[in-house]
Amino acid sequence: MKILVTPTSFLKPDNAKAKEMIEAFADEVVYNDLGRPLKGDEVLERLTGVDGYIAGVDYITADVVEKMPGSVKVISRYGAGVDRVDIPACTKKGIAVANTPGANAVAVCELAFGLMLCAARNIPKLHAAVERGEWPRSEGVELCGKTLGIVGLGAIGRNLAKRAIAFGMVVQAYDPYFDDAFAKDNGIRKAGLDEVLRSSDFISLHVPLSDSTRHMISQERIKKMKRGAVIINTARGGLIDETAAAKALQDSRLGGMGLDAFEQEPLTDSPLKGLDRVVLTPHTGAHTGEAVQAMGMMAVENCIAVLKGEECRYVLNKQKGF
């Protein structure tokens, strides 16, 4: 067996057990030598003779899948998001696609909550000012008593809801597959997407990127939000029209943003840079020791299960043969 492993954080000490497991299973393991997500030919060049592919946030498009060698039987995503994997193309080619749902839920939700606090109190800018020897006064807003709108009540959204409730926030949520039992047990109001966006003080996005969700936070929807609303995005950058959001911040229509995902990554140039009450982090939501370890183990276990012909509950395109 030959395995390709591309997540840039897989070789961290937290993944020592997962690394040991995959190396004990495989005859050969090839690691990402570029230190960044792979694209196109960079993926294909490393797949010769590969049976299993443990993938980071590489760009696994239909063209790439079609050119993959027939030896590839599984793509095991190191993470929950699969928007960069063309699943229909994989299914057509007979390649199983698995992910690690819930493995990083606590890590991402805690960063989302931290971004809310930072945007509400302008913490990064105040810290920088004090470091410069300044002593500014800045009026923020409290989370207690405010309404948090969660778009996507999956594992991350549910964890965030619990923490927001503990802070005294009112929580409402939209999800096309709404968890009514969880909402009832935790006092979460069910609402449509536009209602959540219109009536929330803070809005946190936890949905995958697809044709239907791309720029779901559009100029028109921003205009309908509460004046001073704060948007948090720890999911995918393409969910927000960043140009429209920047203008709304400059016009004081939006009260702030906390962003861990961007339309182009790494972020080099953006209209959001330098704006007050905008907190930017480098897509680091899943990067805690605990989450890295959980994702590594799940990704390896998924890959091995498929290659051994065993049941893998996290395969997303189940069909005869895997």
Image: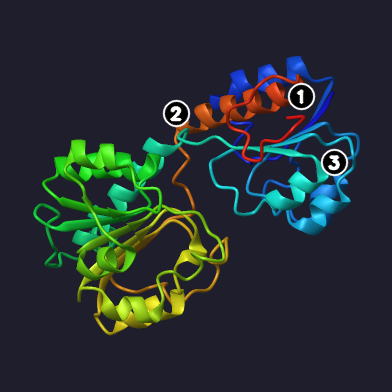
Which mark is on residue 147?
Answer: none
> Can you see residue 133?
no
Q: Position of residue 75 (x, y in %)?
A: 71, 38
**Furthest-top residue in view?**
24
Q: Which mark is residue 47?
A: 3
Image coords of residue 231 (percent x, y) = 31, 64
Of badges 2 and 3, nearer the viewer stands: 3
Is residue 246 positioned above or below 88 on the image? below
- The answer to which image quadrant residue 300 occupies is top right
- 76 sits left or right of 1 in the view: left
Mark 2 lies on a secondary structure that is: helix
| Real-space CA distance between mark 1 and mark 2, rounded to the nearest whole angstrom | 26 Å
Amino acid under disc 3:
Leu
Taking depth in this image into account, of 19 and 83 the one nearest to the observer is 83
Mark 1 vs 2, N-terminal side: 2
Query: Where, quadrant-wise, is the N terminus in this rendering?
Result: top right
Nearest-to-viewer mark from 1 and 3? 1
**Given this view, does label 1 or label 2 mark the residue nearer the observer?**
1
- The residue under label 2 is which amino acid type? Glu
Check disc 1 and report the residue beneath it: 307
Residue found at x 31% / y 41%: 158
Q: Which mark is residue 290?
A: 2
Residue 165 in the figure: left or right of residue 79: left
